[in-house]
């Protein structure tokens, strides 16, 4: 089963040629063609490796990538869109949150455990989708049993001479047993209730159900700051504790959620989910390692608060090279996990990484800083453009928001100017400019009425001129 499931994922990847991957990324990200191309090739190579002859398949190592560029140019957005596109296990982690072995903090193997957890969630969601209709049918029947318990059957007679049946004469003269008539009434009432349930008219009705009670009595072993692995120990301890139930009064809507989880647990084979998930992690897993420049110190730096930076690099090395990592679900090999690293490298540079780690990221792509023309495209071309987002927010209050071409150009000019005069935060500057520009509009809705709002160059200049010209004010607002 796991192999078949992984083959299904690979079959989906077969349709994603590098050109299609880039075209999909173009829908949300402006420019950065080199980075999109490198990522698309690396993703396609996952599928190509699985189609290579078995003798050489294990020898084909993934070509890990480093994306180099200032903040706000699209590095994280490329990773986020890639995650939605692949259907493969994917996580994004910050290299700066890991510390060298011996220091307080997370060890680097935690990223592989997180990837395994992500794969488990992904595979379980797929299994739930497969049995969703059956699980919902079973939940409906259980809710109906709680709303209308079945009639109590009369106990069987112990001796023929003591058996006594009650007969009722119907209007037509037919004779039926009272018990059969009760069952018929119950069936008719249940059918009516089922129709009401399917129509959603009973969602706020309260019923009493049994739910599992925590065996640890609220004692949390996985609190913030607890050593790595304590959460796993708590889960393992719960398995050995006696299962207890408690009765709760909940609405039908809440009961449906609780009972649906129980039905999924009955219908889905957890061992099969784990086997499939670990198989996908090893063959298709992708880890996006952000802020890798934060662990790259300049040559010769020693001591200080960043003493463990080179240690983190050395701890990362075996994970990227390929090693076995123990997770609570079993051993995971990282030989063919694809690593995509990213960093601004303002202070340091990729050559400041230890040579061994540099060698494990053979592909390096530099992302370009965004210009005023790029800002105009960002606000108009992507499917999730900021102008479209704010128009949707304003439409919720019944008002129409329109941006003219010269208004968009003025917003882009302001954002580019502020980036030049202050810290360059790329496309994120558009968020601060748009928030300041539309603050009054969003505050006054819906009291201001449904009169359409038009944002042109004059409106932008009038609203932002005082802030953009005031050096001190600009530092705090834009």
Image: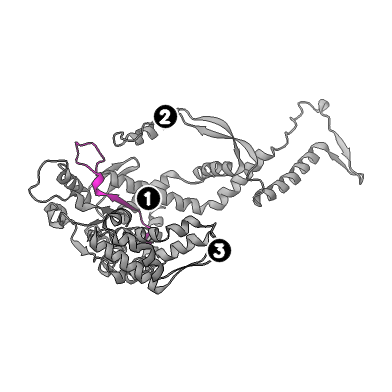
Element type where label 1 sits in the image: helix
Residue displayed at 24% across by 65% down: 369
Magenta stretch?
A: 85-107
Q: Is residue 91 highlighted in magenta?
A: yes
Query: Residues at badges 1 and 2 in contact (C-beta under 8 Å)?
Result: no
* Rendering coords of residue 322 (x, y %): 22, 50
Cα distance in 3D space between marks 1 and 3 = 47 Å
Instruction: Say which quarter of the image contains residue 69.
Output: bottom left
- Name the residue tied to disc 1: 119
Front residue (pair 163, 47): 47
Residue 88 to residue 101: above or below: below
Element type where label 2 sits in the image: helix
Please give left or right for residue 173 compared with residue 262 in the image.
right
Residue displayed at 55% across by 30% down: 246
Cα distance in 3D space between marks 1 and 2 = 26 Å
- Name the residue tied to disc 3: 450
Q: Residue furthest toward the left?
A: 300
* Rendering coords of residue 385 (x, y %): 40, 65
Task: Specify whether residue 380 is in view.
Answer: no
**Dot placed on the residue nearer the N-terminal end, 1 or 2:** 1
Task: Specify whether residue 199 is in view.
Answer: yes
Query: Residues at badges 3 and 2 in contact (C-beta under 8 Å)?
Result: no
**Dot placed on the residue nearer the N-terminal end, 1 or 3:** 1
User: Mark 1 or mark 2: which is in front?
Assistant: 1
- Name the residue tied to disc 2: 240
Circle 3 Cα neighbour tier, 10 Å, few/some/many (<14 / 14–19 / ≥20)? some
Please give left or right for residue 247 compared with residue 463 in the image.
right
Circle 1 Cα neighbour tier, 10 Å, few/some/many (<14 / 14–19 / ≥20)? many
Front residue (pair 119, 368): 368
């Amino acid at each position: 089963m796991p192999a078949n499931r992984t083959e299904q994922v690979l079959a989906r990847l077969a349709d994603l040629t590098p050109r299609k991957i880039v075209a999909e990324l173009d829908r949300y990200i402006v420019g950065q063609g080199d980075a999109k191309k490198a990522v698309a090739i690396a993703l396609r190579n996952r599928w190509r490796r699985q189609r290579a002859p078995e003798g050489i398949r294990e020898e084909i190592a993934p070509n890990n990538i480093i994306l180099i560029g200032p903040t706000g140019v699209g590095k994280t957005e490329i990773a986020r869109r890639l995650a939605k596109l692949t259907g493969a296990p994917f996580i994004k982690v910050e290299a700066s949150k890991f510390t060298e072995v011996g220091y307080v903090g997370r060890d680097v193997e935690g990223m592989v455990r997180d990837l395994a957890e992500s794969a488990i969630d992904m595979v379980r969601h797929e299994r739930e989708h497969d049995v969703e209709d059956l699980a919902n049918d079973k939940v409906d029947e259980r809710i109906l049993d709680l709303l209308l318990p079945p009639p109590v059957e009369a106990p069987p007679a112990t001796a023929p001479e003591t058996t006594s049946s009650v007969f009722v004469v119907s209007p037509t003269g037919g004779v039926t047993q009272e018990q059969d008539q009760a069952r018929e009434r119950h069936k008719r009432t249940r059918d009516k209730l089922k129709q009401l349930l399917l129509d959603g008219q009973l969602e706020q009705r309260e019923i009493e159900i049994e739910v599992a009670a925590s065996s640890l009595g609220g004692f949390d072993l996985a609190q913030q700051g607890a050593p790595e692995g304590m959460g796993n120990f708590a889960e393992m301890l719960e398995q050995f504790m006696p299962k207890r139930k408690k009765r709760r009064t909940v609405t039908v809507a809440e009961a449906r959620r609780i009972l649906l989880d129980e039905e999924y647990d009955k219908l889905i084979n957890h061992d099969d989910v784990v086997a499939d998930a670990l198989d996908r992690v090893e063959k298709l897993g992708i880890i996006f390692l952000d802020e890798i420049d934060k662990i790259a110190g300049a040559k010769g730096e020693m001591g200080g608060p960043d003493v463990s930076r080179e240690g983190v690099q050395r701890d990362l090395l075996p994970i990227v090279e390929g090693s076995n990592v123990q997770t609570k679900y079993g051993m995971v090999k990282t030989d063919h996990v694809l690593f995509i690293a990213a960093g601004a490298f303002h202070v340091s540079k990729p050559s400041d990484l230890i040579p061994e780690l540099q060698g494990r990221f053979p592909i390096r792509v530099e992302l370009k800083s965004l210009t005023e023309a790029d800002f105009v495209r960002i606000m108009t071309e992507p499917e999730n453009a900021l102008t479209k987002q704010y128009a949707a927010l304003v439409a919720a209050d019944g008002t129409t928001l329109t941006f003219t071409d010269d208004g968009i150009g003025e917003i882009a000019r302001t954002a580019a100017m502020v980036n030049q005069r202050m810290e360059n935060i790329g496309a994120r500057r558009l968020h601060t400019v748009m928030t300041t520009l539309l603050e009054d509009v969003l505050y006054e809705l819906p009291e201001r009425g449904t009169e359409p709002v038009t944002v042109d160059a004059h409106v932008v200049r009038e609203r932002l001129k005082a802030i953009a010209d005031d050096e001190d004010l600009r530092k705090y607002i834009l």
